[in-house]
């Protein structure tokens, strides 16, 4: 009777070692580190064990070998010859390997957290034997490397999460994250307003009622100002400050509304470069040039935001114009 009891204990021990091996090593150590940093209680318990990968692996494999070898000896005393060998294979395969690995592979973090005290005890017991082996493996193989994803892979991963019913990511978040991952690869010319569509004013235009009505119709916050030829840009007119100017004054003589400075961007520059420059200068409209004095368009902060969120921004003026 004792032989059967010992054999049962050994089978359960084999199942424990086998299940823990697959369960722990199905968990990525860097994912655990991230979850632990975010406060996941299971990850906090498992990460200190899992990060010492070679020591953990050596402990589990050594324990599994000892248990399975001892089980074979006990089964040989219960049965004999071929029967004992076949019984050992069947019991170890089904109950010592297959069932525990199939179970813990799906719930590795949960079971790993529950059995963390047991695993720490096993590591402590086998430490004099397993540490030298694990140390040699660390020197020979190095530590585990973090899995890095390309932007395309991240975008695909985000889409998979959005498609899953278990994910909290919605369609709008998916669109915005895709835009955030791709906008830095786009160039200014892809997002700018072409020069022929840009509303601009001559420097000698008077700030009268007719001019204010024109500005109200377009409803932009900034306008390029040119002098002489249409392509000679000399500054920027701020719509919000026009109301404080005298009606008779021209744009180039406006004290508050006109800034005699041109913020330039090249058509081939990346959008993230221009965004950083806008945030630094606190100026949200840049005139785009291909050659030094030939404007080809205008890029604004709103244009860049639209590229990120991948959706056109419409304000009250846009809505009224569409109606």
Image (cartoon, helix red, strand yellow):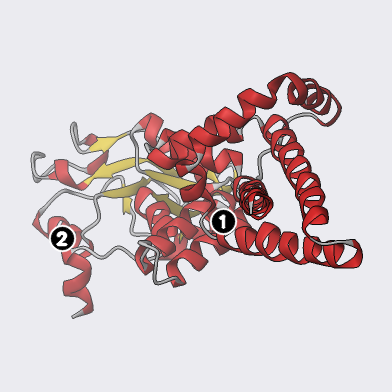
The N terminus, quarter of image: bottom right
SS for dot 1: helix
- Mark 2–mark 1 Cα distance, whole angstroms, equals 67 Å
| Quarter holding residue 44 | top left
> In the image, which is nearer the foreground, mark 2 or mark 1?
1
Relative to 99, 42 lies left or right: left
Q: Name the residue under label 2.
A: 216
Q: Tell which residue pokes out farthest to the front in this image.
A: 1
Relative to 69, 236 lies left or right: left
Query: Closest to the observer: 198 or 181?
Result: 181
Where in the figure is residue 224, as x and y percent of width and height?
Answer: 35, 48
- Return the disc, 2 or 1, that comes first in the chain's sequence: 1
Residue at image point 43% right, 53% down: 298
**Disc number placed over residue 104 in the picture, else none:** 1
Query: Closest to the observer: 96 or 21?
Result: 96
Residue at image point 30% right, 50% down: 223
Query: Closest to the observer: 271 or 39?
Result: 39
SS for dot 2: helix
Where in the figure is residue 35, as x and y percent of width and height?
Answer: 45, 41
The C terminus, quarter of image: bottom left
Relative to 218, 247 lies left or right: left
Residue at image point 44% right, 70% down: 164
């Amino acid at each position: 009777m004792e032989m059967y009891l010992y054999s049962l204990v050994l089978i359960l021990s084999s199942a424990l070692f086998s299940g823990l091996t697959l369960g722990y090593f199905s968990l990525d150590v860097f994912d655990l580190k991230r979850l632990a940093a975010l406060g996941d209680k299971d990850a906090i318990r498992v990460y200190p064990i899992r990060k010492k990968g070679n020591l953990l692996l050596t402990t589990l494999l050594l324990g599994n070998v000892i248990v399975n070898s001892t089980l074979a000896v006990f089964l040989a005393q219960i049965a004999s010859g071929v029967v004992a060998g076949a019984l050992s294979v069947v019991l170890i395969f089904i109950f010592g390997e297959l069932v525990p690995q199939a179970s813990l592979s799906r719930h590795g973090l949960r079971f790993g957290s529950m059995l963390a005290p047991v695993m720490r005890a096993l590591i402590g017991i086998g430490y004099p034997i397993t540490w030298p082996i694990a140390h040699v493996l660390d020197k020979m193989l190095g530590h585990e490397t973090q899995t890095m994803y390309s932007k395309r892979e991240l975008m695909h991963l985000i889409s998979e999460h959005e498609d899953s019913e278990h994910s909290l990511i919605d369609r709008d978040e998916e669109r915005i994250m895709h835009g955030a991952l791709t906008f830095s690869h786009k160039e200014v010319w892809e997002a700018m307003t072409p020069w022929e569509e840009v509303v601009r004013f001559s420097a000698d235009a008077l700030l009268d009622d007719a001019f204010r009505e024109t500005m109200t119709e377009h409803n932009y916050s900034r306008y390029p100002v040119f002098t002489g030829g249409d392509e000679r840009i000399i500054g920027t007119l701020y719509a919000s400050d026009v109301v404080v100017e005298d009606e008779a004054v021209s744009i180039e003589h406006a004290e508050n509304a006109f800034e005699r400075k041109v913020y330039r961007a090249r058509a081939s520059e990346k959008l993230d470069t221009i965004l950083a420059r806008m945030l630094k200068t606190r100026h949200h409209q840049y005139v785009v040039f291909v050659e030094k004095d030939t404007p080809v368009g205008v890029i604004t902060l709103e244009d860049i935001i639209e590229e990120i969120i991948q959706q056109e921004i419409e304000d009250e003026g846009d809505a009224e114009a569409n109606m």
